[in-house]
Every structure is written in structure tokens, then in C-alpha cells.
Image (spheres, grey):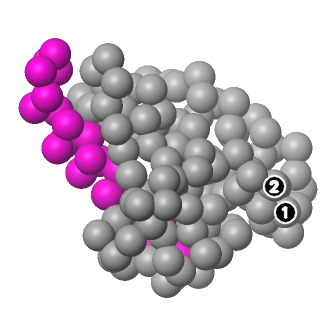
Amino acid sequence: MTDVIQDSIIEEFEIFDDWLDKYDYLIELSDSLPTIAAEHKTEEYVIKGCQSRVWIDARIEDGRLFFSADSDAIITKGIIALLIRVMNGRTPQQIMNMELYFIDKIGLSENLSPTRSNGLLAMIKQMKMYALAYSGEPGQK
């Protein structure tokens, strides 16, 4: 099953011929990251398993999850901005069942260092854990 947002990300990355240009684009995307509240930029919200420091928070509104995040590494900020773009505004169930195929299609997984790949997996896991935690909220099916 395809996803409009993931497909548009794939199209955006197809215009770049090499990974240096794609890294530059990831850096640009870091500006679109929804800012995390200062009170959530604490150890409690830090993602374990990331080389850089990454904070992710989630809130539920009308049965849909919305994420905010920050990182001390600019490429990581771009990566988390992509993840948020794909997962924001979806139900917890949709997020838990989501296949993030854009990651492989844009070549992200094969062009990250092993420690960044581990961080990417840790960020996805944390976002899906938020979805699982909120899946029991009233109004969820």
C-alpha cells in the first residue's frame, strides 16, 4: 500500500543525483521540524540509541498523534523532520502499522553510518511506542 506523503518525499529526493545534495536537502528540512517545548527537552525525552542527542514528544488531539522534536545534530534534525512529516496527524493504530518504505526508496538506510542507522531505528521505535501508549486513549479503535 502506498502513502501520498511518503511518495512525495521519494519524488523530492529523486531530483538529487548524489548523496551530498541529499544531505544538503536533509539539512534544509531541519528548519521544518516542529519545535519541542523547552520543558520536554530533558533526559526523560532523550532517545536512547542515538549518537546525537534527540528529544521527541507526542500529544494526541482528536484521536490523532502530533509530534515535536529537536536534536543537536543538523542531519538528524532533517531525518526526524521527515519521520514527523510522515507520521503527524495519523491515528496511533495507523502509526503502529505503518511501513516506512520511503527510508529505503530514497537510499537513506544505505547512506547512513551504522550509528546513525541505529539512531534512525531508535527514533522510529520511540514514535511507535508513543502510538502504542496513546492507542488506549478514549476514542481509539
Q: Which residue is mark 1?
A: 24
Specify the label residue 65 is tagged with.
none
Circle 2 — which element?
helix
Most foreground residue, 94 or 57: 57
Rendered position, 12 above or below 127: above
Give the quarter of the figure containing the C terminus.
top left
Q: Are marks 1 and 2 in contact (CB under 8 Å)?
A: yes
> For residue 75, what is the image quadrant?
bottom right
Q: What label sits on residue 28 in the rendered view? A: 2
Residue at left 40%, top 60%? 40
Q: Is residue 33 left or right of residue 11?
A: left
* Residue 129 located within the stretch drawn in magenta: yes
Residue in the foreground of this view, choosing between 54 and 95: 54
Amino acid carrying label 2: it is Glu
Q: Position of residue 124 (x, y in %)?
A: 39, 55
Q: What type is the residue that disc 1 sits on?
A: Asp
- Residue 81, image x and y in percent? 61, 50
* Of 72 and 25, the residue lying toward us: 72
Residue located 44% across and 77% down the image: 50
Residue 65 appears left or right of 71: left
* Residues rendered magenta in the picture: 115-141
Give how far across and how far down residue 24 sits, in percent. 84, 63
C-alpha separation, residue under disc 1 versus residue under disc 2? 6 Å
